[in-house]
Image (tube, rainbow, N blue to C red):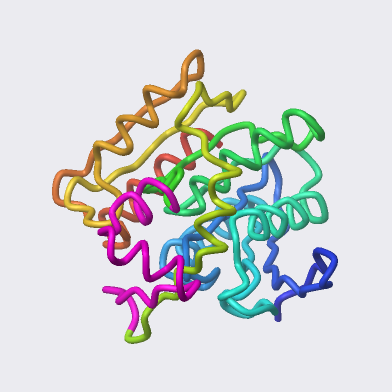
Amino acid sequence: MPQSVTVGQDARSIAVLTREGKGPPVVWLGGFKSDMRATKATALDEWAEQNGRGFVRFDYSGHGESGGAFEEGTISRWLEDALAVIEHHVRERPIFVGSSMGGWISLLAARYLMDRRPNLAPAGMVLIAPAVDMTERLMWGRFPEDLRRSVQETGVYHRPSAYSDDPYPITLNLIEDGRRHLLLDRPIQTGCPVHILQGMEDPDVPWSHALELVEHLPGDSVSLTLIKDGDHRLSRPEDIEQLIAAVAAIA
């Protein structure tokens, strides 16, 4: 059974699964509309169990087993969720594993923690198809003009998904809030080694986006692994092997 952390002025309940262990704990930060029991997070939990490593995973508000409505979600809220979980459950500098939107949240959380809680700032990061600045670059920037106009008029676009039968609501509030958190307009400091895993057949986060992120990570130890036939999820057995190897190398 998951534990819970209460977050925000609306006291939303964030579901958390933890595993005790030694060494820097691994913290899983999942993707947009994903959940903490998905394939990659479960595989990492099994690795953590086998290796006596601490592991923390959670569902953002409006996701999985957490409270709150998905339509009310913003980058600000989901970052607040992540920071609350980290500050409540992590006792030493962790290793962040951020998938898709979780890659963006990881970088934002690292910036906050380096400034406010350096004892909890990440000791390393593995980012899987990191969707940095996704609300602007990968959503709004790709929308045709008529769709932008519709979102501004109605407040929401129900975007069809390749990963679910139900469309994803993309709200105007999500887009506008995302502009408060854009990172690709300046150098990004992480204070730790970063390993990026990126599929070259990813239809959602193009591999050129990962290259641009690397260019914005000056002075840090950064490696990029391009997986030629990899998709966005990178959940095949061979992808999971690469992910676990990357985490183990940083850990």
Q: How many marks?
A: 0
Q: Quadrant of the N terminus?
A: bottom right
Q: Where does residue 160 sit, x and y in percent of width and height?
A: 30, 76
Residue 14 horizontal side relative to residue 180, left or right = right
Q: Is residue 16 magenta?
A: no
Give me the residue at 37% from left, 64% from top: 149
Answer yes or no: is residue 251 visible: yes
Magenta highlight: main SS: helix
Above or below 185: residue 152: below
- Most extreme residue toward the left, as rendered? 229
Above or below 233: residue 132: above
Q: Quadrant of residue 197?
A: top left
Above or below 212: residue 40: below
- Most extreme residue toward the bottom, as rendered? 165
Answer yes or no: is residue 244 visible: no
Q: Quadrant of residue 59?
A: bottom right
Q: Which residues are magenta?
A: 135-164
Residue 183 horizontal side relative to residue 200, left or right = right
Question: Which is more toward the observer, 63 or 15?
Answer: 63
Question: Which is more toward the observer, 43 or 165?
Answer: 165
Give me the residue at 42% from left, 39% from top: 246
Give me the residue at 36% from left, 62% from top: 148
Residue 97 horizontal side relative to residue 59, left or right = left
Q: Where does residue 226 sit, x and y in percent of width and height?
A: 24, 38
Question: Which is more toward the observer, 44 or 168?
Answer: 168
Q: Quadrant of the C terminus?
A: top right
